[in-house]
Image: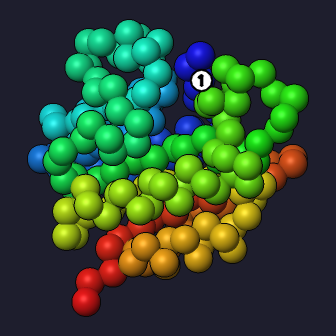
């Protein structure tokens, strides 16, 4: 199953358009439909698409995507990492295929935690991460995970939906 662009993808792509510059080395991690990376390609010729879904990889084969569970098969550093993760808390009744593209773990933040632990090893010194997540994920917990992993963050936008809020964050490594 491929995550089709929804509100989270559409607001994030707006920020990708604002941040991406020619010559940047960009990673669209967990790329799903590839909307973020395709937008980055409009401004930068060096975009890496990655996902762990064979279906996604097949659909994006023209972009030479890398099969990777987060950074497992990523061996480079990037100026911009784009992350629209599965971020919803687990629903035991949800079918397993949709759970894979929507659920970020039991509480919703577990995948974000793994991402943050690994991302710092793949972000260039002045690099930026653009990430989206939901109020259903527990904003305070995500904020604490960001700080715990030596990132600083800036909330770029809040999108209010009927049942939740979406947060778009800019993350940078905290330099000592």
Q: In this orientation, which residue lies closer to the viewer: 12 or 88?
A: 88
Q: Residues within 10 Å of mark 1 (few under 14, many from 20)?
A: few
Residue 7, placed above or below residue 116: above
Q: In this orientation, which residue lies closer to the viewer: 140 or 20?
A: 140
Residue 97, placed above or below residue 21: above
Residue, x 59% and y 76% (percent of image)?
144
Query: Which quarter shows the N terminus?
Result: top right
Corner quadrant of residue 117: bottom left
Q: Position of residue 174 (x, y in %)?
A: 33, 81
Is 93 on the left or on the right of 67, as rendered? right
Residue 50, placed above or below residue 153: above
Q: Is residue 160 visible?
A: no
Residue 55, placed above or below residue 156: above
Q: Position of residue 102 (x, y in %)?
A: 67, 35
Residue, x 22% and y 70% (percent of image)?
126
Query: Which quarter shows the C terminus?
Result: bottom left
Q: Position of residue 34 (x, y in %)?
A: 42, 27
Residue, x 55% and y 44% (percent of image)?
85
Residue, x 42% and y 67% (percent of image)?
171
Q: Position of residue 54 (x, y in %)?
A: 43, 15
Q: Which residue is mark 1?
A: 4
């Amino acid at each position: 199953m491929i995550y089709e662009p929804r509100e989270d993808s559409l607001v994030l792509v707006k920020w990708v358009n604002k941040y991406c510059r020619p010559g940047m080395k960009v990673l669209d991690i967990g790329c799903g439909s590839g909307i973020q990376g395709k937008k980055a390609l409009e401004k930068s010729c060096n975009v890496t698409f990655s996902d762990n879904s064979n279906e996604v990889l097949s659909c994006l084969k023209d972009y030479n995507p890398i099969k990777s569970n987060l950074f497992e098969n990523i061996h480079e550093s990037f100026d911009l990492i784009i992350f629209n993760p599965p971020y919803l808390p687990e629903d035991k009744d949800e079918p397993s295929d949709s759970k894979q593209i929507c659920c970020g773990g039991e509480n919703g933040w577990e995948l974000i935690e793994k991402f943050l632990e690994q991302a710092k090893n793949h972000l260039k010194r002045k690099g930026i991460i653009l990430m989206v997540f939901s109020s259903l994920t527990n904003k305070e917990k995500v904020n604490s995970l960001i700080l715990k992993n030596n990132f600083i963050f800036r909330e770029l936008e809040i999108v209010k939906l009927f049942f939740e809020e979406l947060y778009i964050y800019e993350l940078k490594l905290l330099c000592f």
